Amino acid sequence: MTEMKRVLVAMSGGVDSSVAAALLHETGHELVGVTLHLWDADGAQQVGRCCAPEDRDDARRTCEHLGIPHYVLDEREAFRKHVVDPFVADYQAGRTPIPCVSCNRTVKLTYLADVARRFDATHIATGHYARLARAGDGHLRLLRGIDDEKDQSYFLFGLPQSTLERLVFPLGELRKSEVREAGRRLGVPNASKPESQELCFVPDGRIGDFIERQGTPTTPGNMVDSRGEVLAVHEGVANFTRGQRRGLGLGGGGARYVLRILPDRAEVVVGEESELYDAQLRATDAHWIAGRPAEPFEAEVRIRYRHRGARADITPNGTGFDVRFEEPQRAITPGQAAVVYRGDEVVGGGFIA
């Protein structure tokens, strides 16, 4: 990594990015704070991270406290094009997308690399819980954050080396409790701000309602069992994800889970939990941090953010890879990311097909 001169800090208004800025300021780095205006919450929703005027105000107050300049850049058009529109299309196609991966790869970090050049900044700092290390071959390695509960390396597998070369993760070696403590010690104005647990642009978690508000009506259809027997009528496939148990509207009769979503027929297939387990998956649109592996290999694969990971054989092919797990995994879900790890290192990842 080249010597840091001026650092652009991505300021979301949350405690993590604020403390990242404060820690860099404490060590004497010249900083510029930048907040991306990505989305405007509509209706009576409670606003969430990255979307609320209050969040931009919190970022501004932190920059004022540190005595550094703060800029707000309007990226709403790019966010809709690269994140929200594909998100809506995926749900309508029966997939469960993971928009944070696309946002980091297209709208946030890669875009901020260009913005940094305008400010003559050599590096970009974020509040992600992840780490970087230089390998013997010169490539940067992306590593898990020290805090297992907050680690965000899963969301960053799609970043190219050119972007990683400019990134700084001040929180990668810290646990969340230590970040809060550092925020209080450094007088960060929002050190006690609570965290958002939902998508920044769907703060109430109601995916189907959000899609309706985007002017894309959902199509009602049948909920059927594995034999094709109709059990109920649903309001649209966008309201469901594989493995879902709650909100099926089936009443009694024992627990049932979403097994498959068939958008062409507007059908949702439900069944027993035992039917949710699979031993293999195919991933597409793969990105390898240090280059595509030439041969099959063994590693650990995470199939969702909160998945702890499982041992598997990985076979790269074309623009993707095949995964065969040592033990079947529950609810492998199309649209989610399959991220490959060797120990703490992110080897690469792709999207479950």
Image (tube, grey):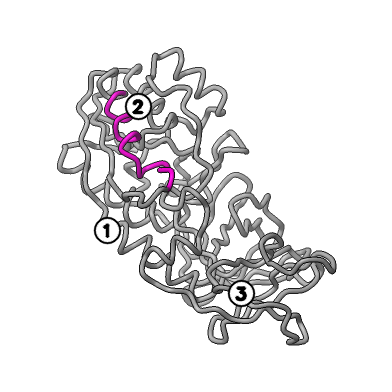
Residue 351: horizontal and vertical position, in percent? 52, 66
Q: Residue at x 84, y 66 (%)?
A: 254
Q: Is residue 16 above or below residue 202?
A: above
Q: Is residue 228 above or below residue 21?
A: below
Q: Please give the range of residues in magenta.
A: 45-61
Calculate the distance from the C-alpha at mark 2 to the C-alpha at mark 3: 47 Å
Q: Which mark sits nearer the N-terminus, 2 or 3?
A: 2
Disc 3 on helix, strand or loop? strand
* Disc 1 packing (10 Å; few <14; some 14–19; many ≥20): some
Quadrant position of the C terminus in the picture: bottom right
Q: Looking at the picture, which amino acid does disc 1 mark?
A: Ala
Query: Can you identify the residue that label 3 sits on?
Result: 234
Calculate the distance from the C-alpha at mark 1 to the C-alpha at mark 3: 33 Å
Query: Can you identify the residue that label 1 sits on?
Result: 78
Disc 2 on helix, strand or loop? helix
* Magenta span contains residue 92: no
268 sits left or right of 328 in the view: left
Q: Which mark is residue 295?
A: none
Q: Residue at x 46, y 40 (%)?
A: 132
* Disc 3 packing (10 Å; few <14; some 14–19; many ≥20): some
Q: Which mark sits nearer the N-terminus, 1 or 2?
A: 2
Residue 9: horizontal and vertical position, in percent? 30, 34
Q: Looking at the picture, which amino acid does disc 3 mark?
A: His
Q: Looking at the picture, which amino acid does disc 2 mark?
A: Ala
Quadrant position of the N terminus in the picture: top left
Query: Can you identify the residue that label 2 sits on?
Result: 21
Q: Which mark sits nearer the N-terminus, 1 or 3?
A: 1
Q: Nearer the viewer, mark 1 or mark 2?
A: 1
Among the 4 quarters of the image, the one containing residue 134: top left
Among the 4 quarters of the image, the one containing residue 229: bottom right
Q: Is residue 309 above or below residue 192?
A: below
